[in-house]
Amino acid sequence: MIRLENVTKIYGTETVAVRDASFDIPKSQFVFLVGPSGSGKSTLLRLINRQEQPERGDVWVAGQNINELPASRVPHLRRSMGNVFQDYKLLLNKTVFENVAFALEVIGKPRHVIARQVPIVLDLVGLADKQDRFPNQLSGGEQQRVSIARAFVNRPLIMLADEPTGNLDPTTSEGIMGLLDEINQTGTTVIMATHDHRVVNAMRRRVIQLDRGVIVRDQERGVYE
Amino acid sequence: MFSRIAYAFRETWESFRRNLTLTAAAVLTSAVSLLLVGATFLIQRAFENLLVQWRGDVEMIVFVRSDASAEQVTLIDSVLRASPTIIDVEKLRYLNKTESYEEAKRIFAGDPVTLGLLTPETIPTQFKVVPLSDDPTLVRSLSDQYRTLPGVEAVALAEDEFEVISTLSNFIRVVTLITSLVLLLVAVGLIWNTIRTAMFARRREIEVMKLVGATNWFIRIPFMLEGLLQGLIGGVVSCGGLWVLNSAWTSGVTSFKPGTGISSLVVPDSYLTSVMFILLGIGAFVGAVGSAIAATRFLDV
Ligand SMILES: Nc1ncnc2c1ncn2[C@@H]1O[C@H](COP(=O)(O)OP(=O)(O)OP(=O)(O)O)[C@@H](O)[C@H]1O
Ligand SMILES: [Mg+2]
C-alpha cells in the first residue's frame, strides 16, 4: 500500500530530516513510527500525503509514484487518506457535526451523502449525542474523536496519525487507540507517529524506529524500547 | 454541483461581513478609479462632438456680414479666386442666407437659444474655403488678408479651433488616463490585500481543506468571487457617481452662454449607458485579477 524507496528529505540546505529511508507497508497494517523529537516522524508522514516531496528516492502509494503525480491530482490522492493530529485541527466556529461534514462538503459530496455518512461515523466514535456541541465544549479526548471521525468519514484507505494521543491522559489515550484499532480492523492502513511508550507496548504492532532521520529498527510486533 | 455553488456563495458572504472595513476601502477605491475612467470616456466624447462640428475638409470659413452688398460678396469671391495656387477653387463654396441658416439649424440642434437668435435675415453668409497648401503660416497670412476685405465679418481657421480643442483634449485624456490607471492599480492592490487578509484569517480552514483533498479551485473560488464582487460593487457605485456627474454637466452646459457651440459637449444617454457597462466590466476584471493573484500566491505556500 505504501512503499518508500531510499527516500531522503532535506529542509533548506542543512537539515536532513529523513535519510535514505525504505520500507514497505502492506494494506491493512498498523504501524508505529517512533523515535525522539526531531527524528523525522512527522516529516515521513508529510512525505506520504505529499505535503512534502523528497530530494531523493520515491514514495509509492497504492501503486502510484506520488512524486510524479501532477499537482492537480494531489487532492485525489489526499482523499484516500485521513489525517489526525496532536492538536486536532478542528474548526472552532463549527459544531461537531459541521466539522465532520466539512470534510465531505469541500470535496463536493452531495447533501444526502453528507446527511447519511456523518451520523454513522459520529456513532462509531461515540459522539452521536454531542453532535451539536462546539469543540471548546468538549474534552480533549472527545475533540480527538471528532478529528478521527472527520478523517474517517470519507472511508480512506490510509490513516495518518501524528501523535494523536500526545495531549491525552493514559485512559483517554487507550480509548483513542481502541478507535484507531477498530478503524484498522475495517481494512484501513494506519500509520501512527508517537512518543507514547505505553500505547506502543500495549498494542504490539509493527514498529519503525527513527533516529536523526535514519531508520534504525523495523520490527513486527515490536515495543517502544 | 448545487452544494458546491451554495458553498461558494455562503463562504463569500461570510467573508465579506467579517472584513467590512477592508472591503469598504477596496470598494471605494475601485469606485473612485472607475469613476475617473468613466469621466475620461465622457470628456473624450464631448471633445469629439466639438470637433465633428468642423466636419468635411473645410479648413477656413470667411464669414460675410449679413448686411454686405452684392458687390462686396462678388469682390470677396474674386479675391478668393485670384489665388488658385493657394486655395482650391474647385471646392470653393458660397452659402447664401438660406443655406447658412440651414446649416446653423444643424449645428445648433442642441442649442435652441442660439438658434433662436438667428434668422435667415440676420445670419452671416459664408465662403467655405479649402486651402491647397499645408503650410499653416501661409494659410494664416491668407486669412489675415481676407479679414481686411470690406464686408468680411470674420475669418475662422479650423486649425485654430482644432489646435485648442485637441491640445486640451489630449492633455485631459493623458492626465485622467494616467490617474485612473494608477488608481486602478491601487484598487487591485487593495482587493489583493483584503483577499489575502481573508485567507489568512481562515488559514486553518484552508489547511483542513487541503488535507482532506479539496481542490485548489474549490478553495480559491469563494475568495475570487469575493474579489470580483468588490470590484463589481465599486463599478456600480462609480456608475451612480458618473450619472450624477453627467446630469450636473448636462444641465450646466445647457445653461451656458448660447452661441458658443458648447452645447455639443452634451453626451448622448446611449453613450453614457455603454460607458457604464464598460465600467462594470473593468470593475469585475480588477476584482478578479486582485483576488486571483492573492489566492494563487496564498495557496502556493
Ligand atoms: N518545515 C520545516 N522546515 C525546516 N526544517 C524542518 C521543517 N519541519 C521539520 N524540520 C526539521 O526536520 C527535522 C525532523 O522534524 P520532524 O518534525 O519530522 O520530527 P519529529 O520526529 O516529528 O519530531 P517531534 O517528535 O518533535 O514531532 C527536525 O530537525 C526539524 O527541525
Ligand atoms: Mg512530529
Image: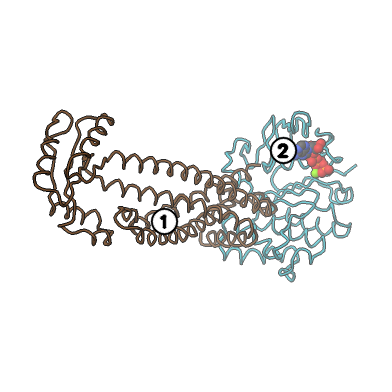
In this view of the protein, can residue A207 be seen by the observer? no
Residue B137 vs A71, above or below: the answer is above
Q: Which mark is residue A24?
A: 2
CB at mark 2 closer than 8 A to ligand 1? Answer: no
The residue type indicated by label 2 comes to: Asp
The residue type indicated by label 1 comes to: Met
Question: Observer-nearest residue: B235 or A30?
Answer: B235
Chain given the colour cyan: A
Question: For the point 18% across and 59% down, which residue is it?
Answer: B119
Question: For the point 88% across and 57% down, which residue is it?
Answer: A169
Residue B83 vs B105, above or below: the answer is above
Colour of the chain lettered B:
brown
Q: How many numbered callouts?
A: 2
Q: Position of residue A66 (x, y in %)?
A: 63, 38
Chain on which label 2 sits: A
- Residue at the right extreme? A225
Rate crowding at label 2 as few (under 14), some (14 to 19) or many (20 or more) other CA atoms within 10 Å: few
Identify the secondary structure beneath mark 2.
strand
Q: Quadrant of ligand 2?
A: top right
Q: Position of residue A43 (x, y in %)?
A: 75, 40
Q: Is residue B232 left or right of residue B270?
A: right
The residue carrying mark 1 is B276
Q: Quadrant of residue A155?
A: bottom right
